[in-house]
Image: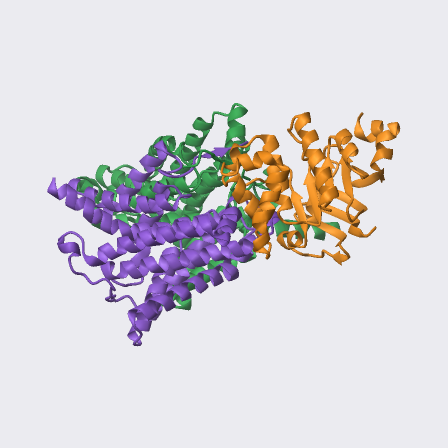
Chain colours: A orange, B purple, C green
Amino acid sequence: MKTLLNVKDLRAYYGQVQALHGLSFSLSEGSLTTLLGANGAGKTTTLRAICNMVRSTGAIEFDGQPLGHRSTENIVRLGIAHVPQGRGTFTSMTVEENLQLGAISRKDKADIASDIERMYGHFPVLKQRHTQQAGTLSGGEQQMLAVARALMLRPRLMLLDEPSFGLAPLVVRDLFRILGKINREEKVSILVVEQNAQLALELADQAYVIETGRIVMSGAAKDIANNEDVRKSYLGY
Amino acid sequence: MDLFFNQILAGISTGAIYACMALAVVMIYQAIDHLNFAQGEMATFSTFVSWQLMQWGMSYWAAFVISLVFAFVGGLALERVLFRPLAKAPILTNVAGFIALFAIINSSTGLIWDFTIKQYPTPFGSAPFLGSQLISTHQAGMIGVTLALLLALYFFFQYTRIGLAMRASAALPESARLVGINTGWMVSLGWGMASAIGAVGGMLIAPVVFLEPNMMVGVLLYGFAAAVLGGLSSPLGAVVGGFLVGIMENLAGTYIPGIGNELKLPIALFVIVAVLVVKPAGLFGRPIVKRV
Amino acid sequence: MSAVEEVATEAPAIEAVPKRAMTLGTGTSLVMLGLFIVAPLVVKNFVTFQLTMLLIYGLAVLALNILTGGSGQFSLGQSAFYAVGAYVSAILMETYGVNYALTLPISGILCFVIGFLFGFPALRLSGIYLALATFALAAAMPQLLKLGFLEPWTGGVQGLVIDKPDAPFGLPISQDMWLYYFTLVIAIAIYVASVNLLRSRSGRAFMAIRDNEIAASAMGVNVALYKTLAFGVSAGITGIAGSLGAIVVQFVAPDSFSYNFAIQLFLGMVVGGVGWLPGSIVGAAFIIFVPNISESISKGLSGAVFGVLLFVVIYLVPHGARQVAIVCQQALAKWRKR
């Protein structure tokens, strides 16, 4: 299977503080991978580094192309959608405007309208609220909107930063079910960062565990989920 | 009662000037989240450019259009060249930059065209409007153009892709980048548009206050005040604010004894501040909820 | 009208100056002090006069630094307090024959009270709105000073002329030199007091408010009290500076205190480094000398030259003189290590 994302020796810095100490991992096309770890381990920093939102060194290759010093928006335009922590919803704009913004960098304007309909198919509640201001949606609905907005890019790779944060378990299950469906049916590779390891391991094929800025464990999600030692040492359950 | 009504009407027509300037102010605020003190000078410079073109024989409308283009490109270029490098600097440093730009443009305008007052033509003529003694056709034209600009801006922001991108970029720059928007260019575009709007304002105001390098200093202050009064996030507020400021200025001058010309500005400002104490986000502004 | 309110989780607009970096090191301070003490002995009277003005403007910028850099409140209105201080001294000296030195505490206290009172309506405003309100104050001041019914005291548009005081006890030094040392002592006293203020509990309260007002209030800081206090202190110091200015220049007139002066003080604060008290003197030097330099470079384009020089400064050191000091400090540390 083709490697879609290859990260080599990634070191990231917040000012003088080093948050990642030589991270290396890769994703293959079509995979659903989860990045796990405790608070402060460096999961969010990893996603931010991929999109050049934080100072970093190391080699990141997407679809064989090195990302180099491209700006965030140019990296996104290569086909990497990033749903940040806190969702980054444009709260003062309507649901529909948020979806339109997801597609704003696309050149094929004709398909955007049909894509919006497709998103409403995945997330019917968004259709109900499509003229409402995004800030009035519930947490779960905003998360769905954020995912839908990311999908409007027609990305090859979707990065999600703690999508389960602040959501009720049933809502999270629903969301993860939809993510799995999108991964299989629309062939979008997904990298999801999570603190909620259990649910993430049920969803993903591959898993990596980060601790203090380094990868300490990798493997099939099933194996990691079944490995009691790993679970107790790194994942806390 | 008649006098009162007349003053209100007169206030609305002077207010059109402030409304136009306020629109440019809100425009830039929407793009970069702070105010550019050099905007008035940029508008004056563009107006002088159009005047010069007419001196060289060009027709009014040709000069008007070319000056608009010049203002747009100039504003965009100024942002790219002078303020892009300051993007990571603290806000107050950027404010100092605006003040520096003000000094540079004001001084240059004075040197190139000197300080004698010049006549500036109006395409609307100065006949009484609809036979009324209170508003001239030019003033009616000013109000009309300002409202037309407001409408155009509304459509731009609400119904075009670029307008949507600009709104997103101003609201949440990081999220905007995450949907692939080049926020740097959005800011530059905002500057260009604000500069062009300011130029329109300058070319409308010059027939009334006469063209000279310091023409816009007072107007810009009133324009700021109007924008703040209306709520810095609302173009409609800017226009309403402009008219209100014009009315206030006229009423204060007429009804409060001992108010010479010089005290009008501080009085207008104080009234606005009083409004802000009651409604901190301005009349039409969205109240901002601050999270810790 | 939108039902949704915008949520602002913004970084503070004014960055913090770390505590240990708040003043110059002891060594540097002593050297600076030495220079200030010796200077008038080796230069002409006129230069002494300029140095005195430097100290006075430095005080005014310092006051702004406490208000903006310390408590995070923007003010474009300092010229108003300066004017009040200047006129208070002038009127007390000329109309009531009060000794010049005595006018200083009176002016300081009066301006403190005015500033403190102004701080109350200012509580509801912040950022650009506060800047506008203070700017209104600065714009109004020259007009208020020209008001007809105040003329018997203020001298109206012509202003007031003040007699220059002699050195006391018949000391054999010129008036300029005496005023210089007089100002120097006061400036040092205020500087030391200000540094101590910012290091004290009140200072920490100021800075907590600057960095995150809501969090500060949740922690029990009496935000209203400290904000108005900051305004009062800042106004008081500016008033004293104004008084000194009046005495040294020997003249007050309404148009000397326009909003242009307030803008100059703001620029002085930025050039010196916002919130960095030692930078105040650098900022003052910039606003006194650079306009003169600009004019000597080009009479017709003096404004443009000034603007260009200002740009050069903010490009090279966006954080003002403080940045230069930090670079020097780091260079010195490296040199010591080798």
Q: Identify which residue, C303 or C279, lies in the foreground.
A: C303
Q: Tell me what residue is drawn at x 33 percent, y 72 percent.
A: B53
Q: Is residue C317 left or right of residue C117?
A: right
- Which one is nearer the viewer's eye here, C64 or A43? A43
Q: Tell me, yes or no, if residue A16 can be seen here.
A: no
Residue at x-position 87% and y-position 34%: A223
Query: Which image quarter is the C terminus of chain B in?
Result: top right
Viewport quadrant of the N terminus of chain B: top left
In the image, residue C130 lies at what x, y percent?
Answer: 40, 39
* Left or right: where B52 falls relative to C189: left
Residue B112 seen in the current view: yes
Q: Position of residue B56 (x, y in %)?
A: 31, 76
Give coordinates of residue C66: x percent, y percent.
47, 38
Which residue, as the protein is rendered here, is positioned at the far bottom? B57
**Left or right: residue A31 compared with residue A143:** right
Q: Nearer the viewer, residue C282 or A151?
A: A151
Q: Is residue B162 above or below residue A145?
A: below
